[in-house]
Image (spheres, rainbow, N blue to C red):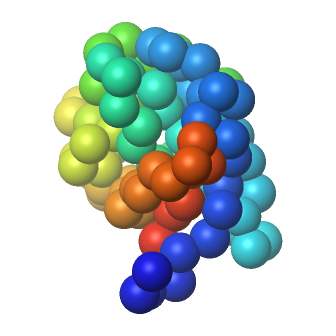
Amino acid sequence: MSGNWMEAASLDAIPEDDVIGVVVAGRDIALYGVGGEVFATDNVCTHGNARLCDGFLEGHEIECPLHQGKFDVRTGAALCAPLTEAVKIYPIRIEADKVYVDLG
C-alpha cells in the first residue's frame, strides 16, 4: 500500500450507524459505520474541544456533543452554525477485515 496507511481497527469493532474513537499513530481518529461503509475524520471538533465519537451520528452527519454543530463524515464539511471550519477526513481501506486509514 502506498501512502501512510496505518491499521486503525478491526472491521467488526465499528458498529453500524455509530461512531467509535481510536488512536492511530498518536492521532485521535473517529471511525463511522454508515450504510455498510466506513468513514474516518479527526475526532476533535474544529469549533470546541469535544470528541466527535461522543456525539450523535444520524446518517452521514455527526453532531458535536458540545454545541450541536454537524459535520458530513464523507466530506468533513461543516453543515451548520456554530461550525465554520471543516473537520479533516482520512481515506479508508479495508483489507482482510482490518480498517486502515491514510494519515498522509
User: Residue 96, image x and y in percent?
Assistant: 57, 49
- Quarter of the rendering containing residue 59: top left
The answer to whether residue 63 is seen in the rendering is no
The quarter of the rendered structure image containing the N terminus is bottom left
Please state which of residues 66 and 20 is positioned toward the viewer in this rendering: 20
Compared with residue 42, is residue 104 higher up or lower down, i.e. above or below? below
User: Residue 30, image x and y in percent?
Assistant: 58, 44
User: Residue 8, image x and y in percent?
Assistant: 66, 55
Q: As drawn, is 90 to the left or to the right of 20?
A: left
- Residue at image x 42%, y 37%? 38
- Quarter of the rendering containing residue 86: bottom left
Compared with residue 31, is residue 16 higher up or lower down, i.e. above or below? above
The quarter of the rendered structure image containing the C terminus is bottom left
- Residue at image x 29%, y 25%? 60
- Residue at image x 62%, y 70%? 6
- Residue at image x 26%, y 42%? 74
Q: As drawn, is 67 to the left or to the right of 27?
A: left
